Structure formats: C-alpha cells, structure tokens
Image (cartoon, rainbow, N blue to C red):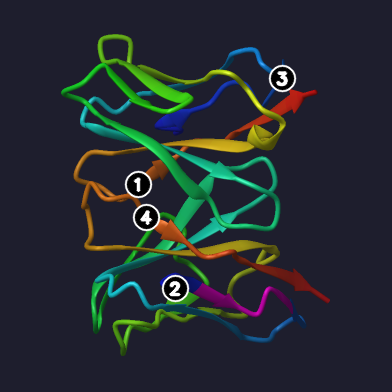
Amino acid sequence: DGGITQSPKYLFRKEGQNVTLSCEQNLNHDAMYWYRQDPGQGLRLIYYSQIVNDFQKGDIAEGYSVSREKKESFPLTVTSAQKNPTAFYLCASSTRHLTLQPQHFGDGTRLSIL
Amino acid sequence: DQQVKQNSPSLSVQEGRISILNCDYTNSMFDYFLWYKKYPAEGPTFLISISSIKDKNEDGRFTVFLNKSAKHLSLHIVPSQPGDSAVYFCAATGNTPLVFGKGTRLSVIA
C-alpha cells in the first residue's frame, strides 16, 4: 500500500539541539514538501524539492535544512537556529511540482521543546 | 499578507443539514483550488478540487463552487454526517507552491 511515512510521531528536543524528522514515500513521486502547522494556523511551506539533489526554500526556511539524496526520502533538520520549533510538521509529496494532482500527506511529527 | 483566507474558524451544523465552508483569495494568478480535510494528529487528505475554467465541481456529497469575479469559493457538504467533523483547509495555486488558508473546524452534531 503506497503512502508517506513520517517518523517519529512525537519528538522532544532540548535547547540548542538539532533534530531530524524523517519522511519516506513509496509513491514514486518526484516532488516532496515540508510544512509547519501551528495552532489556529494554516500550513506554511518550509522547503520543497522538485527532484533528487534539488530543493528550494519555502516561506519559512530559516532555522531548517533539508536534503534529497534519494527520491523516496526528504529528511528535515530543525536546527538550534530555529527559535520557536514547537509545532506539528507535515511532509507531503506529489507526482511532480506544480502538478494539478493533489499532494499526499503523511501523518505528521509533533515536535516539542524540553 | 494572507493570500487565502478562511474567515470562519469554526462552524457547527446539525446532522443531515448542509454545511457551507467559505474561502476567499486575493491573488488573481491562482487558477486551481483544492479542499483538504484533516482529523487531529493526522495529515490532511485531499477532498475535492476545481480549476478556474469551471464554476462547479461535484463529488458525491461534496460540491465546490468557484466565483472568480468575487475571488471566492465554497465547499458544500450535503447531507452532513458526524464523520465529517474535522478541520477543512482551502488551498490555491497558480504556478506556485500551494498556499493554504488557516482552516475551518466543522462540527456536525447528531
């Protein structure tokens, strides 16, 4: 059954620590995305990747980094430079960037600061 | 600057009645619009979409209407069911990454 897997579901970070959120898809999609959701807010785009070894900043990229070494994987690192990292993080994919096909989402990772 | 606005944070509807969720946008370059449904602690799931060349699209109990001149779209759910209780996000694109509204929480009361 094809889909997007995000892990872990819950993650705790100490002050000054980098953490990496995993996102894997087996949909054979070219494009992948990371969003952040805060309470009462919509989804805001952090980074996206149209193809392997390529990625672009979204609206709120500061304090985050990504890599796209494999088509299936698009990990997000929340660095210590991100001053307010507590949020719900969602990964998504689509057949290709700017397609009219809808994005498919994972079930998210909730990150909290200890 | 919010390009996609969902001005009602919440909506309560009785089971069996019609639910109408509204969405306004400001960017005239948007030409494709989507609705997503989200349950707590899960990712959004795609519900229905509409292209700017249409003014209506139906899929079962769900209908989306687009008024380009008013830059307004709405999602109608008829009849509403308790399982429809969720947060609904409107999203738009126009050769850009998707832009999402803040969502409307729909509660369908039995």
Distance between the alpha carbons at the discs numbered 3 and 1: 32 Å
Observer-nearest of A41 and B55: B55
Q: Residues within 10 Å of mark 2 (few under 14, many from 20)?
A: few
Q: Is residue B2 above or below residue A92?
A: above
Report the front residue among B55 and B22.
B55
Give the residue displayed 35% in from the left and 46% down from the top.
B98
The chain to which mark 4 is attached is A
| Tag of residue A103 | 4
Q: Secondary structure at mark 1?
A: loop
Q: Chain of mark 2?
A: A
Q: Are marks 1 and 4 on the same chain?
A: no
Q: Is residue B30 visible?
A: no
Q: Whole-percent x and y of residue A107? A: 59, 64
What residue sits right under mark 3 in the picture? B15
Question: x, y (%) of residue B35?
Answer: 44, 36
Residue B49 part of the magenta segment: no
Question: What residue type is disc 2 on?
Answer: Asp
Which chain is disc 3 placed on? B
The crowd level at tag 1 (other Cα within 10 Å; few <14, some 14-19, many 20+) is many
